[in-house]
Image: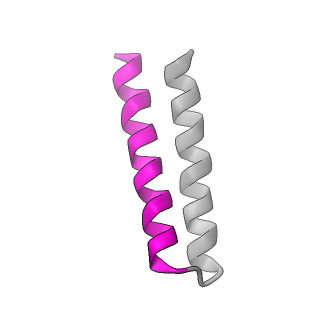
Amino acid sequence: MIGALCLILAGFLSGGAYSVARQGGSRVAVGILGTLAAIAAAAGVLWLF
């Protein structure tokens, strides 16, 4: 259950990073959101296995 929630969170964060990048947001904001998305995805995958 927690693994699936982490993967859902990763999806929202990656979508947010993409949206911020498309709207011309700063590279720092995109980098932070992308990093958080990668961490959440890794946590979700590791939690499931």
Task: Report the label total.
Answer: 0
Q: Please report the bounds of the magenta region as a residue range.
A: 26-49
Q: Is residue 3 above or below residue 6?
A: above
**Colour scheme:** one colour
Q: Position of residue 4 (x, y in %)?
A: 55, 24
Quarter of the rendering occupied by the N terminus: top right
The residue at the far bottom in this view is 24
Position above or below: 4 against 21: above
Asked if the magenta segment contains residue 40, the reply would be yes
Identify the residue at horizontal 45%, vertical 61% (top origin): 32
Q: Position of residue 11 (x, y in %)?
A: 57, 45
Principal secondary structure, stretch drawn in magenta: helix
Question: Which quarter of the image is occupied by the C terminus?
Answer: top left
| Location of residue 31 (image quadrant) | bottom left
> Is 46 a magenta residue?
yes
For residue 43, what is the image quadrant? top left
- At horizontal 43% and vertical 39% (from top left) the residue drawn is 41
Residue at image coords 55%, 63%: 17
The answer to whether residue 47 is above or below residue 15 is above
Residue 5: give x, y in percent of width and height: 58, 27
Q: 21 or 31, which lies in front?
A: 31
Q: With 45 as the anchor, is 7 left or right in this view?
A: right
Q: Is residue 8 left or right of residue 40?
A: right
